[in-house]
Image (cartoon, rainbow, N blue to C red):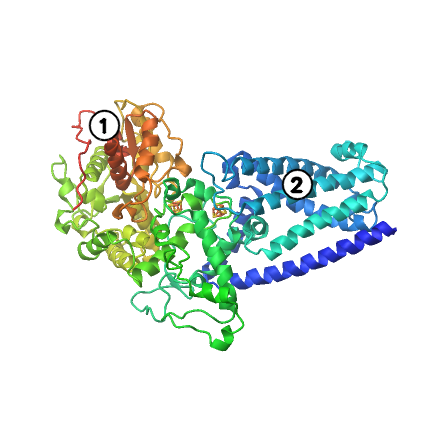
Amino acid sequence: MGSVQIVTTILAAGITAVAVWLAVRAVMKMTAVIRLGQPAPERFADKGARTRKMLVETAGHTRMLKWGVVGAAHWFVMVGFIVLSLLVLEAYFEVVTPTGGLPILGHWTVFGLATEIITVLGLVGILVLMAIRLRNRPNRPGGRSRFTGSTMWQGYFVEWVVLLVLVFGLVIRGFKVATDHFEYPVWATPVSHAVGAILPDWSDGASVAALIKIVISMTWLIVISLNVTMGVAWHRFLAFPNIFFKRDPEKPAGSGLGPLRPMTSQGKPLDFEEADPEKDQFGVAQVEQFTWKGLLDFSTCTECGRCQSQCPAWNTGKPLSPKLLVLSLRDHAYAKAPYLLAGGGKDLTGEEKATQAQLAHLDVLSLAEGDKPLIGTAEEGGVIDPDVLWSCTTCGACVEQCPVDIEHVDHIVDMRRYQVLIESSFPSEAGVMLRNLENKGNPWGAPQNTREDWTKGLDFEVPRVGEVDDFEYLFWVGCAGAFEDRAKKTTRAVATLLNEAGVSFAILGEGETCSGDPARRIGNEFVFQMLAQQNVETLNEAFEGREKTKRKIVATCPHCFNTLGNEYGQLGGEFEVVHHTQLLAHLVSTGKLTPVQPVDGGVTYHDPCYLGRHNRVFAAPREVLGDSIQGELTEMPRNSERSFCCGAGGARMWMEEKIGKRINVDRVEEAMATGAKTVAVGCPFCSTMLNDGVNGKGAGEEVEVIDVASVLLRSVKPEQPRGDKESTPVAG
Ligand code: SF4
Ligand code: SF4
């Protein structure tokens, strides 16, 4: 070992020892913070499916590849990081001796070839990612950036480290080539040989370059260890467990969607008949009341801003950005952690748990963080502003896009649950809706005995459950479908088409109440459970004696469709629920319904969030429309998984939209820009919102918003009186 190698070896060992010590400390700190969360035992079930999902999502980059170039570039960088870690390891042999290499593997030409390819592709990948970050930098002139609010220096730092580590990998090899100590042939390592051709014949070059590579790598490790909230770096490790512990590994991408998690306390679903607010946790009032998976979510955020770029609230000037919400919760959790780890925290009655002696050594900032309300305005020192919390439509675009499977919607609803159930703090206008649900069983407060009014004037009998036993489908009409004028047209159209196709169906009529979706999404789990239990009982009775595959329900409202199909199972109601567009598509494809007259004027389709993203029903409505117009749909730029919300979900239908541009107007402008004369929808709330948007733009005469079923009915029975074009909806 020469004098140069003695120095390089000592320096490499020194900086590595410091970095590893700091990294171990950082990992222990992060683990301690994540363990502060509440239990989530269900996350340990289905380990096989979880492992498969994690491998498929990471190796296949299934989320990232939806973003084309950036996904491909990130894949190469990720593979580069994993495989080229071996080359960092090899650098430790090279600081000791310039001709050194990894034992066994380092003498294998295949290894030389593979690492050469990955180095080159990794270089291309990181340059692409750097260019994309620069092009999307928040301070660039004009335009919105998904990186607004991200800690930009961290992103630049990580990218430069990757770039330099890759470059110095080639420089080490180049010095070996120049000194004639490189084992791999030119055909396997042409770039290394090209670099070697321009480097001097310096015998210590490989050791010095290896030291620089180690210093860069260990500087990265030191910096991220001193910044445990640096998700842009830590996600390289945390993404794996975060994807592994996602809540439903069997479901396809976007699987954080569909059913909401039940309310839990100490890891067990809350039973409202026995629950006690002084002993049981009702929603989330403190950051440590999220589950440990929630805290892992916050730690894993890469600050990539994909969620933010898709969020309807953020895109219309509301204060909510799912990314900034996650970052606020993350920063608060880590700042509050010293106080919590010292034994601090409030019990469920709001009393401090720690003694003064326990908190005596804490700095004033940790103590102050412990006192911050989780939900509160800037003046109150709140972590999350109420306007942020209540701006969410629960559309799920954030969950759909997040490359590391963060479950924003669950966290938002958990915080809403505490605000509604314990603080009674929510936008006051929604109070009418909740009272109507409790007293009348529907959000409009319409009399229950008018639930069947939509059947009047139909030229066939609509059978009720109890009057007929042999129905195939129970037609779940929903509150909008029963009480709201425009939605009643859809209900009638669906009933007419089912009758036309010879499908045997029956309705519950006055036996139906609200599915409970708006109560659950606003956070009133108590009212949701009250309504849901009643409905589950009614439905179980209606289907008595039938196995699950024969307990078929067809629903026109995607919110009912989602709640009945995905959430009633949590209360003992197992049904096979289809959306009416799925059933209609089946009836057309099997020849039971025949579109005869093409609907003209151009048709575009708006995907309802709870049908599309939350339940992956994208094809059926498009098939029905394609058959009805006997041609191609005109798609909006934001469609299918990336569809833009109408603004009504998450009980926003019953809240005023006071901040920023109206979401429905934004969507209507997009629909109108397609030039289509018909905007087809598959949800009564979307119908109301988009109709309001069209009328607000004074385009009610040129553009028509109607349900897919009505479009089909016009094609199947062109002689049917139109009457679909509505005036003002009824809101009782
Ligand atoms: S669910 Fe929709 S509205 Fe809510 S934060 Fe996510 S993207 Fe925004
Ligand atoms: S998409 Fe996921 S990782 Fe990216 S900023 Fe949003 S929450 Fe963080």
Q: Quadrant of residue 175?
A: top right
**How many other residues sit within 10 Å of disc 1, few (<14), some (14-19) or many (≥20)?**
many
Q: Secondary structure at mark 1?
A: helix
Place of residue 367 in the rendered image (x, y in percent of width and height, measured from the top left)? 47, 67
Type of the residue with mark 2: Leu
Closer-to-camera residue (157/515)? 157
The reply to whether the C-beta atoms of the residues labelled 2 and 1 are less than 8 Å apart is no
Marks 2/1: CA–CA distance: 60 Å
Q: Which mark is residue 248?
A: none
- Residue 183 shows in this picture: no
Place of residue 534 in the rendered image (x, y in percent of width and height, measured from the top left)? 24, 57
Q: Is residue 46 left or right of residue 598?
A: right
- Residue 464 shows in this picture: yes
**How many other residues sit within 10 Å of disc 2, few (<14), some (14-19) or many (≥20)?**
many
Q: Secondary structure at mark 2?
A: helix
| Residue drawn where x is 55% and y is 38% of the image | 133
Closer-to-camera residue (130/91)? 130
Closer-to-camera residue (430/516)? 430
Q: Nearer the viewer, mark 2 or mark 1?
A: 2
Q: Does 430 appear above or below 108?
A: below
Place of residue 461 in the rendered image (x, y in percent of width and height, measured from the top left)? 14, 39
Of all residues, the one furthest to the right in this rendering is: 2
| Residue drawn where x is 41% and y is 38% of the image | 641
Type of the residue with mark 1: Arg
Place of residue 19 in the rendered image (x, y in percent of width and height, measured from the top left)? 68, 57
Q: Is residue 52 left or right of residue 472?
A: right
Q: Earlier in the sequence, mark 2 or mark 1?
A: 2
Q: Is mark 2 within 8 Å of ligand 2?
A: no
From the image, tell me which residue sits under label 2. Answer: 163
Closer-to-camera residue (131/88)? 131
From the image, tell me which residue sits under label 1. Answer: 714
